[in-house]
Amino acid sequence: MDLSDEILIPAPRDVVYAALNDPEVLKDCIPGCQELTKYSDTELEALVVLKVGPVKAKFKGDVVLDPAGAPESFSLTGKGSGGAAGFAKGGADVKLEEQGDQTLLKYTAKADIGGKLAQLGNRLVASTSKKLAGQFFETFSEKVGQS
């Protein structure tokens, strides 16, 4: 499954980049996030409760950030398990473009899923993923824009 989108955030690039690396900001923005632990500048662990169609599960996952191109771009990879509900693994490439006092955030993400989630069908999982990504970026934009 592939997802890509862009959003204009009403804040300078350095503020957006810092917020994308702030566990408290991320925890508040990730739908269903119950815990987010930062182990280092590049390693995070998350506990998220999600409902995809009829399947509700608690996912525990690890995320690794590659800040090689920061603050203009960076990538991340992650994998998580939801027990009987299945697993997910994937990654994303993020680009941050300055546009005056705003930042255009563009992302491209890929994910592989298995277990009960995969049995639900790609259309349902893809539409739910797109909805969750939209909720994240809408909340993120509001939160960062208020800073």
Image: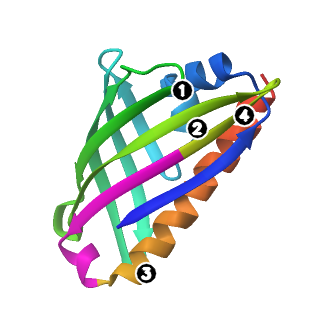
Question: The residue tagged with tag 2: helix, strand or loop?
Answer: helix
Quadrant the C terminus occupies: top right
Spatial distance from mark 2 to mark 4, Cα to Cα? 9 Å
Q: State the quadrant of the N terminus.
A: bottom left
Q: In the rendered view, would you say 55 is above or below 48?
A: below
Q: Residue at x 66, y 22 (%)?
A: 13
Q: What residue would you read off at disc 4?
A: 143
User: The residue under label 2 is which amino acid type?
Assistant: Asp
* Element assignment for label 4: helix
Give the residue number, with chain letter if any, for mark 1. 24
Disc 1 or 4, which lies upstream in sequence? Answer: 1
In the picture of the structure, the residue carrying the numbered disc 2 is 28
- The answer to the question of whether label 1 and label 3 lie on touching residues, with beta carbons closer than 8 A, is no
Magenta segment: 107-119
Q: Callout 3: 10 Å neighbours few (<14), some, many (20+)? A: some
Residue 59: image location, x then y, percent: 30, 53
Residue 122: x percent and y percent? 35, 80
Checking the image for residue 124, the label placed there is 3
Label 4 close to label 3 by CB (< 8 Å): no
In this rendering, the label closer to the viewer, 2 or 4 = 4
Image coords of residue 104 (percent x, y): 68, 38
Q: Are marks 2 and 4 in contact (CB under 8 Å)?
A: yes
Q: Residues within 10 Å of mark 1 (few under 14, many from 20)?
A: some
Report the Cα–Cα distance between label 1 and label 3: 30 Å
Say whether residue 61 is magenta.
Answer: no
Residue 53 appears in the picture as rendered:
no
Considering only order in the chain, which callout, 4 or 2, is on the residue closer to the N terminus? 2
Magenta stretch, main secondary structure class: strand
Q: Residue 142 appears at what percent x and percent y?
A: 76, 39
- Comes first in the chain, label 4 or label 3: 3
* Label 2 close to label 3 by CB (< 8 Å): no
